[in-house]
Amino acid sequence: MRRIVSFGPALVVLIAVISAMWMAPRLVSQMRHEATVTRVALARQVVAQDDILGRLQSQTRAIADAFAPSVVHIEVRSFRGPAGSGWVFDEDGHIVTNAHVVRGSENVSVQFADGRLVRAKVLGTDAFTDIAVLKLDPGAGVTPAVRSNASDIVHQGDIVFAFGSPFGFKFSMSQGIVSGLGRAPSGALDNGGLTHVNKTDAAGDPGNSGGPQVGIRGRVIGMNVAIATGADSRGTTGEGQSDGISFAIPMGTIESVVTQLINNGEVRRGYLGIQMNSALQRVVVNDEFLGAGIAISAVNPPDGPAASAGLRRGDVIVRVSGRELVNSDVLRSLVSSRQPGESVRIDVLREGEPTSFDVVLGEFPAVALIDPPAQWRLIGRLGSRDSDQADDGVHLTRVRGDAPRGRLGVESGDIVTRVGRTRVRDAEDFALALFDNNIQDGRTVIVNLIDAESDKPYTIELRLR
């Protein structure tokens, strides 16, 4: 009896310990569940009471509704196949898209979101900015997109919406941010041209080309022009799987080019008359940072716009018409988007002192837009790897063996004398003549040559594909 009594308390403690070990996990689990229930209830209360996401969603839907009638799908039947997208520029039925979308075509079909299919004519193109203008048949009812103006400055981090027909999925919309400014995707424009574009992460794929990019105020701030792919991170207008990076032509460039194509049928560009360093230069005086800009390495010609206004070598340009500079491409684009004869305000730092000049722009020489690598690529279309300047034309040397004479009829030593009706004497002449004859638009250009062996003239038809 005593032994049983002496073990009693210990047994009670043991039972209590075992019970606690068995109950503790259940109690902890129950406490966690109750905490979760409380947290979910609070979160649901916040969601129900705070309508921030609802208002954001309503705004996004409103932008989609506002642009639905202004975005078009463009069908092109040519050697390039079905094309891309565009948008309504004005009430007169002008449609804006990329030049590469309609290259090689004169008449295209434009489809609206309501199902209407309308014929359109290519009114004009500008290969150097990859912009084209179409004109709808009279009588087609249109709703122009609202465009941004000079006061709408795009900043890195701005929310952007991209419209288009990715992989043929018509009238699609994606969202992202402006992830970079003043970029130059060298693979997008083979001829060189003006490649100051904005970089975004709004989804872009083949078929988005020519579609508008829209800001949060419902205004067009740019136009899709190229994407980066795994195969070509420099930017391409061709086929390929998107890497999540797209590029857009800024509205300032679009406005100038489109207006000139509509009014004049051609594009003239402003010219400053300077040579400049490509990188941004910081100006520091006595350990004080005064600003950053593009340094002028030379002012020429001596009687050019910059020299006449008083700009000098060593001046650091910090702003053009109030716009700060990211790199030399932005400076070049801001100037060239103006027309010859316009006056622009140039803010500079001269020996550390800020000063301003009003410069009346000259006209940018067309040949300067075609960079030297592009000139050699055009000569390469004839199968040649090199050329020599001569009085009687362009001597083609080292013609590739895989450029069959039966297709183009060109061999080493042959001489290019004319492109269309234009005499050529060097690579610059040849490249400029090809562009003057609209080879960039997919046109067939007649090239006159002299056979090196027989000394007899012959002609070929050259076309970009």
Image (spheres, rainbow, N blue to C red):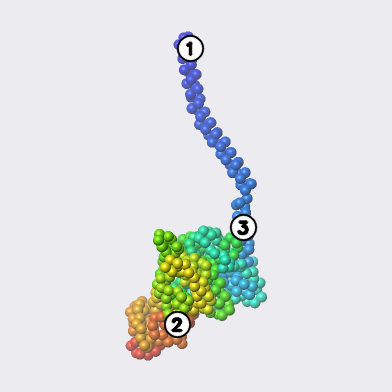
Local SS, label 3: helix
Question: Observer-nearest residue: 181 or 145?
Answer: 181
Nearest to N terminus: mark 2 or mark 3? 3
Local SS, label 2: helix
Report how far apart the C-alphas of labels 2 and 3 lie in the structure: 49 Å
CB atoms of marks 1 and 2 within 8 Å: no
Question: Observer-nearest residue: 71 or 361?
Answer: 361
Q: Which residue is mark 2?
A: 433
Up the image or down, 232 lies above or below 260; here it is above
Quick check: can you spot residue 419? yes
What kind of residue is marked 2? Ala
Q: Nearer the viewer, mark 1 or mark 3?
A: 3
Q: Quadrant of residue 175?
A: bottom right
Up the image or down, 33 lies above or below 345; here it is above
Up the image or down, 19 lies above or below 226; here it is above
The structure residue drawn at horizontal position 46% and vertical position 12%, both measured from the top left corner, is: 6
Which mark identifies residue 5? 1
The structure residue drawn at horizontal position 60% and vertical position 74%, both measured from the top left corner, is: 94
Question: Observer-nearest residue: 226 or 340?
Answer: 340
Q: Residues within 10 Å of mark 2 (few under 14, many from 20)?
A: many
What kind of residue is marked 3? Gln
Q: Is residue 183 left or right of residue 91?
A: left
Quick check: can you spot residue 238? no
Q: Nearer the viewer, mark 1 or mark 2?
A: 2
Question: Observer-nearest residue: 178 or 405?
Answer: 178
Question: Residue 249's spot in the image, x, y percent?
Answer: 51, 68
Q: Residues within 10 Å of mark 1 (few under 14, many from 20)?
A: few
Local SS, label 1: helix
What kind of residue is marked 1? Val
Nearest to N terminus: mark 1 or mark 2? 1
Which mark identifies residue 59? 3
